[in-house]
Image (tube, rainbow, N blue to C red):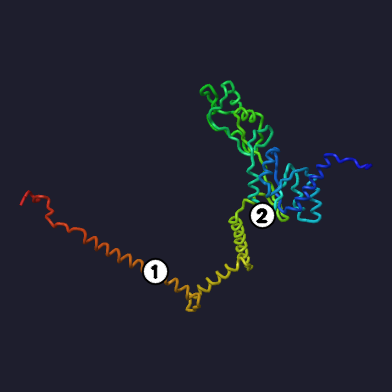
Amino acid sequence: MSDEKPKSKRKIRKESLKAKIDKCVNEFKNILICNVDNVGSNQMQKVRIALRGRATLLMGKNTIIRKAVREHAARNPQLDALIPHLWGNIGLVFTNESNLNALREVVLKNKVPAAAKSGSFAPIDVFVPPGPTGLDPGQTGFFQALNIATKIARGSIEIINQVHLVKKGDKVTSSHVALLTKLDIKPFFYGITVLKVYEAGSVFDSAVLDLTPADLYAKFFNGVRKLAALSLAIGYPTQASLPHILGNGFRRLLAVSLATEYEFKEAKAFKNAAAAAASAPKEEKKESKAEAKKEEAKAAEETPAEDEGDFGLGGGLFGNDE
C-alpha cells in the first residue's frame, strides 16, 4: 500500500492554476492586466464568453501567478517587466491579437449598474435630477439635512434643482446611500478596467492604446522640430537641421545674386518667377481698368439725355412775370 497522502482540494486548485498559467504564458505573447474590483462572477462569465476564441481571461491567487511568471522569466527575461504589476485584485487577459485596442473595448463594454456603497469612493460624479420623488411629505427633513431644496407638489416631495450629490473621487457616506436608495438610483457602473498592457517585453499604460497614427506622427514631428531648433541654436548639424541649414545658405546666395550681377541657375529661375509674379497684377489692373471704361460707356449710352429747360423760379425776381 502507498503511504502517500491524498492531495487536498486547495493544493489541487493551486496546481491547476499553475498549469493554466504555464499554458497561457507559453501560448500567448500579449497580456492585458485588468482590475476586477466590484465585478461579480456572472459578469466575469459574460466577459469570458465575449472573449472566447480571441483571448483567455485568467484569475487566481497573486502569489501563485508571480511564482509561475518568475519560473518562466528565468528562461524568458522579458517577463521580468510583468512581475511588479501582479498585485491587487487583478485578472490577466492573454491574447495573440495585434489589435489590443479592439480587445480592450470588448472587455470594457461589459458593465452592470450598481448601487452606491457606504465608504467607497465615487468613480464618477453623482447627480440627483430635479422632479418628483414619489416620497411622502413626512420625509422633508431628510432632504433638509442634505441641504436639498424641495417643495410639496401633488402630495409628494419634489426636488427643485439638480443636485451635485457626490464628486468624483469623494467618499460615499451613509446619508448619500440612504438618499440614492430612497430614490432608487444606481449611479455607478462597475466592470473590468484595463490598467496596463504587456507587449513584447514592455509594460505600458492602457491609455497608450487610445493614440491614433495621427497622434503618433504629431508627437514624432514635434520632437524632430525641437531637435532641429536645438541643432540650429548650437550650430551642430544633424539630419533634422540639415534641410534648414541648406535653405538658409541658399537664401544668402540668392541675396548676394540679387545685390550683384553674379547669377547662377537657381537664382535666375527665381528671378524669372518673381518677375512673372510682379507683372501679373499689373496686367490684371490694366484689364480691370479697360473693363471699367467699357461699363461706364455702356451705362452712358443707356441713360436718357435730360431736357434742357428753363429752371427759373416761376417769375421775375422783382415781380416781372414775363
At which x and y percent is residue 175? 64, 28
At which x and y percent is residue 252? 53, 72
| Residue 83 drawn above or below residue 139 | below
Residue lying at the far top of the rendered structure: 138
Q: Residue at x 81, y 52 (%)?
A: 71
Residue lying at the far bottom of the rendered structure: 262
At which x and y percent is residue 240? 61, 65
Q: Is residue 316 left or right of residue 201?
A: left
- In the rendered structure, find residue 280 and report the number of the disc placed on it: 1
- In the rendered structure, find residue 98 and report the number of the disc placed on it: 2
Identify which residue, 129 or 163, lies in the foreground.
129
- In the rendered structure, find residue 187 and report the number of the disc placed on it: none
| Residue 91 drawn above or below residue 227 | above
* Quadrant of the image containing the N terminus: top right
Identify which residue, 138 or 70, lies in the foreground.
70
At which x and y percent is residue 59? 74, 43
Mark 1 Cα shell of 10 Å, populated few (<14), some (14-19), many (≥20): few
